[in-house]
């Protein structure tokens, strides 16, 4: 990896003896935090410490581990939150579920997908029907179909007024 890297943004300067590919010894600033080389060449003094080539690689490795652990923690929190939300939606009464923001969003997506048109008779769609209730609370869009009121009632003969 090249020594001249973009610094971490918090440069804590240490002057070091630097040996670039040109072979001419230079004095350079090395960030004490991330180990990158930054800034212009400075005058070399006799007791100047040698540039630490491994510092930047060690900093990047440590940062990678930190971000991987942080990402794993965030994913665990996300899944825990989703599991709670799902169990809440699955556990509520169906009429209560139909009042949730989740259902309103899914309903709107289905109506938009079907261009607000009943998928049976092509009249204006006003309702959305669950093809299956197996995934209530986390239904797939393909499990929903836009229907007009009449066609929706035909899908539920048990609820038809007599």
Image (spheres, rainbow, N blue to C red):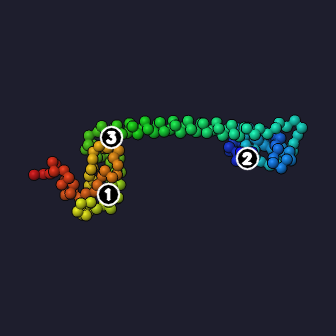
Q: Position of residue 78 (x, y in %)?
A: 45, 39
Does label 3 or label 2 sit earlier along the sequence?
2
Q: Are marks 1 and 2 in contact (CB under 8 Å)?
A: no
Decide if residue 2 is on the left or right side of residue 157. Answer: right
**Disc 3/disc 2 C-alpha distance (Å):** 53 Å
Residue furthest to the left in view is 162
- The disc label shown at residue 89, or none: 3
Figure check: 115 above or below 7: below
Categorize mark 1 by other alpha carbons within 10 Å: few (<14), some (14-19), many (20+): many
- The picture quadrant where one finds residue 121 is bottom left
Q: Secondary structure at mark 1?
A: helix
**Disc 1/disc 2 C-alpha distance (Å):** 55 Å
Q: Position of residue 49 (x, y in %)?
A: 83, 36
Does label 1 or label 3 sit earlier along the sequence?
3
Decide if residue 12 is in sight here: no
- The disc label shown at residue 55, or none: none
Q: Position of residue 81 (x, y in %)?
A: 42, 38
Q: Are marks 1 and 3 in contact (CB under 8 Å)?
A: no
Q: Nearer the viewer, mark 3 or mark 2?
A: 2
User: Residue at coordinates 88% horizontally, 40% vertically from top-left?
Assistant: 45
Task: Report the residue marked by disc 1.
Answer: 111
Q: Secondary structure at mark 3?
A: helix
User: Residue at coordinates 55% horizontally, 35% vertically from top-left?
Assistant: 69
Q: Are marks 3 and 2 in contact (CB under 8 Å)?
A: no
Decide if residue 84 is in sight here: yes
Task: Report the residue marked by disc 2.
Answer: 2
**Disc 1/disc 3 C-alpha distance (Å):** 21 Å
Q: Position of residue 91 (x, y in %)?
A: 30, 37
- The picture quadrant where one finds residue 135 is top left
């Amino acid at each position: 990896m090249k020594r001249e890297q973009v610094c971490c943004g918090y440069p804590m300067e240490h002057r070091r003896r630097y040996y670039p590919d040109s072979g001419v010894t230079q004095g350079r600033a090395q960030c004490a935090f991330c180990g990158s080389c930054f800034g212009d060449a400075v005058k070399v003094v006799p007791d100047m410490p040698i540039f630490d080539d491994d510092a930047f690689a060690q900093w990047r490795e440590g940062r990678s581990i930190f971000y991987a652990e942080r990402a794993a923690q965030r994913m665990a929190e996300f899944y825990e939150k989703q599991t709670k939300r799902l169990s809440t939606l699955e556990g509520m009464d169906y009429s209560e579920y139909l009042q949730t923001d989740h259902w309103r969003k899914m309903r709107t997506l289905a109506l938009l997908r079907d261009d607000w048109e009943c998928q049976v008779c092509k009249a204006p769609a006003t309702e959305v029907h669950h093809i299956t209730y197996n995934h209530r609370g986390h239904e797939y869009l393909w499990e929903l179909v836009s229907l007009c009121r009449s066609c929706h009632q035909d899908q539920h003969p048990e609820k038809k007024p007599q």
